[in-house]
Image (cartoon, rainbow, N blue to C red):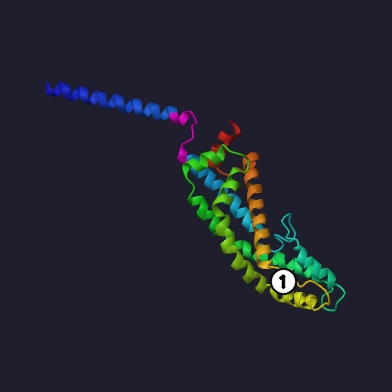
Amino acid sequence: MFKKLAILLVAFQLTACTELQNIAGDVLSSGELSSLEIGNGLKEALNIGISKGSDRLSVKDGFLKSAYKILLPPEVQKVTQRLSGIPGFGQAEAKMLELLNRAAEDAATEAKPIFVKAIKEMTFQDATSILMGEKNAASQYLHRKTYSSLEAAFQPKVKTSLDRVKATEYWNKAANTYNKIPLVTKVNPDIDKYVTSKALVGLFGMVTKEELQIRNNVGSRTSDLLKKVFAKQDNR
């Protein structure tokens, strides 16, 4: 009797094992994405976008000769234009424009680790919502999650960068010279804060651009995981 029961139990286990294998095979062959795959695919895409975006902006002319060039704030323009006829300040506007953008390029190296931290903290629910959301859903997510941290990290870095490229020194000389002109309204704009805000506009602009590239251009999906994950978006 016990021998027969043992044979029946083994047969049942083998049958159950076969059924599980069949179910697993059906799931895999159906092409359904797991939450893990969606999460990893989105994180891979965002890491690519962030790396490309911050790397392009952090090189020489990354800001100055791009669509994200930082223009002079109105107060600075007013000063540089007024000083154009004064010896030593003939090229003040062009000089300040270059120096502010050099500072932003120098500071852009701070962006990547902060973005990467936010990506690591992304939940599976976040990833699924981003994948099936708007074309810039990932960029919007990063903006919500990282802007305050980026701003806090950027401003001291921008100040250091402005000092390093001599922008602070040059601006102080220009502002002091301007403020000595009779009847002018004295100026002293916070260029640290201005460059920080404009640099962040450029960074998020580049991340959005790279996100759209991966979403819209199949050739930009450089791994099997990216191809699989974003195929789900294409077929929605």
Rendering coords of residue 89 (x, y %): 82, 75
- Kindly tell me whether residue 224 is visible in this rendering: no
Q: Amino acid at mark 1?
A: Asn
| Quadrant in the picture for residue 221 | top right
The N terminus is located in which quarter? top left
Q: Nearer the viewer, residue 156 or 227?
A: 156
Q: Left or right of 54: which side holds 32?
A: left
Residue located farthest toward the front when viewing the structure as drawn: 183
Residue holding disc 1: 188
Q: Left or right of 63: which side holds 31?
A: left
**Tag 1 secondary structure:** loop
When the figure is inspected, residue 2 is found, relative to residue 55, above or below; the finding is: above
Q: Nearer the viewer, residue 16 or 118?
A: 118
For label 1, the crowd category at 10 Å Cα-Cα, with few meaning under 14, some 14 to 19 and many 20 or more, is few
Rendering coords of residue 88 (x, y %): 82, 78
> In the rendered structure, which segment of residues is drawn in magenta?
27-36
| Residue beneath the point at 54% across and 58% down | 114
| Residue beneath the point at 63% across and 52% down | 204
| Quadrant in the picture for residue 175 | bottom right
Residue located farthest toward the right when viewing the structure as drawn: 85
Rendering coords of residue 40 (x, y %): 49, 44
As for residue 31 lying within the magenta part, the answer is yes
Q: Nearer the viewer, residue 61 or 193?
A: 193
| Quadrant in the picture for residue 85 | bottom right
| Residue beneath the point at 40% across and 30% down | 24
- Kindly tell me whether residue 36 is visible in this rendering: yes
Rendering coords of residue 160 (x, y %): 62, 71
